[in-house]
């Protein structure tokens, strides 16, 4: 009787699944020690088998915050293989423990190609009471890129000053492509959002100068004043283009 011969890749996948199965069972155990050992083994061996993801997503609700952090770190280590855990990681952004929130935010940084459904919640973390969580959220959103821009621009109008500042930093990291979005905020009548946009444009720096000069010279009085304020904040890098523009005027 002939038995089917598995390819080397199939054999490897079968071996990974066999290795993962007892660990997945361990993650579901009510015994904290068993769960902890399973997570440590996954991290130590660098396992990335997708069959582990549902069990890790289940263990992310463990009552021990250190276990939750370890589980999240294991998911982050798995990279794209952990994409199906994004909903569980998004929920962890609301965890009461700042270490858990930071770990979840960092995991979403590793999974940024799959993190678009979490954008709204990550933007909320820009206003987190913990500065490290805010900083990591800035990195995640700037890595996600264009898809995060509408939420980030909206966050410039937040009543939370920390969230406004972090949103400005995230937008600035995206550079020249977001300049039109930020300039449009000058004209919307929301002074809080306009101030946030001005801060972001100042952080963008030189790439924003030509468009700011255009607003300075041809915008309405309010927009012109905001453009002037932003150019002053940019400082010396804005001077050469500004001098040229004024000479042509």
Image: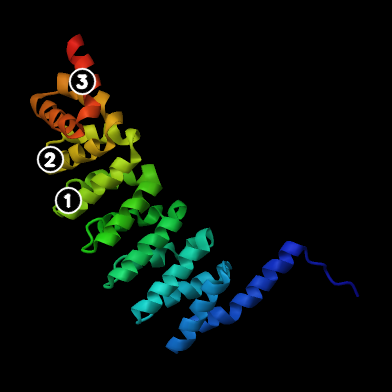
| Picture colour scheme | rainbow
Residue 6 falls in image quadrant:
bottom right
Q: Position of residue 66 (x, y in %)?
A: 37, 78
Q: Residue 14 carries which label?
A: none
Q: Looking at this rendering, what residue extends furthest in the bottom direction?
A: 31
Residue 245 visible? The answer is: yes
Alpha-carbon neighbours of circle 1 within 10 Å: few (<14), some, or many (≥20)? Answer: some
Q: Where the N terminus falls, by quadrant?
A: bottom right
Label 2 or label 3, whichever lies nearer to me, is 3
Q: Where is residue 213 in the image (x, y as percent from the top left)?
A: 20, 23
Q: Where is residue 97 in the image (x, y as percent from the top left)?
A: 28, 73
Residue 168 falls in image quadrant:
top left
In-front residue for pair 149/169? 169
Q: Distance between the residues labelled 2 and 3?
A: 27 Å
Element marked by disc 1: loop
The residue pinned by badge 3 equals: 242
Residue in the picture at 35% in, 82% down: 63
Q: Where the C terminus falls, by quadrant?
A: top left
The residue pinned by badge 1 equals: 158
Residue in the picture at 43% in, 53% down: 112
Q: Where is residue 52 in the image (x, y as percent from the top left)?
A: 54, 72
Dot 2 or dot 1, earlier in sequence: 1
The residue pinned by badge 2 equals: 190
């Amino acid at each position: 009787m002939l038995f089917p011969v598995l390819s080397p890749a199939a054999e490897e996948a079968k071996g990974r699944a066999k290795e993962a199965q007892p660990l997945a069972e361990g993650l579901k155990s009510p015994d904290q020690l068993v769960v902890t050992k399973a997570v440590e083994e996954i991290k130590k061996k660098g396992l990335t088998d997708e069959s582990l993801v549902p069990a890790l997503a289940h263990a992310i609700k463990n009552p021990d915050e250190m276990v939750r952090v370890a589980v999240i770190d294991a998911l982050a280590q798995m990279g794209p293989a952990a994409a199906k855990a994004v909903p569980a990681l998004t929920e962890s952004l609301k965890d009461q423990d700042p270490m858990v929130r930071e770990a979840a935010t960092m995991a979403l940084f590793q999974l940024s190609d799959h993190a678009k459904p979490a954008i709204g919640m990550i933007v909320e973390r820009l206003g987190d009471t913990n500065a490290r969580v805010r900083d990591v959220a800035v990195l995640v959103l700037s890595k996600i890129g264009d898809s995060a821009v509408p939420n980030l621009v909206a966050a410039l109008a937040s009543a939370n000053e920390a969230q406004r500042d972090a949103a400005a930093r995230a937008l600035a990291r995206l550079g020249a492509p977001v300049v039109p979005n930020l300039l449009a905020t000058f004209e919307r009548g929301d002074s809080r959002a306009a101030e946030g946009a001005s801060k972001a444009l100042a952080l963008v720096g030189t790439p924003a100068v030509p468009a700011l000069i255009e607003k300075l010279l041809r915008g309405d009085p309010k927009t012109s004043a905001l453009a002037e304020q932003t150019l002053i904040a940019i400082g010396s890098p804005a001077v050469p283009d500004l001098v040229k523009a004024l000479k042509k005027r």
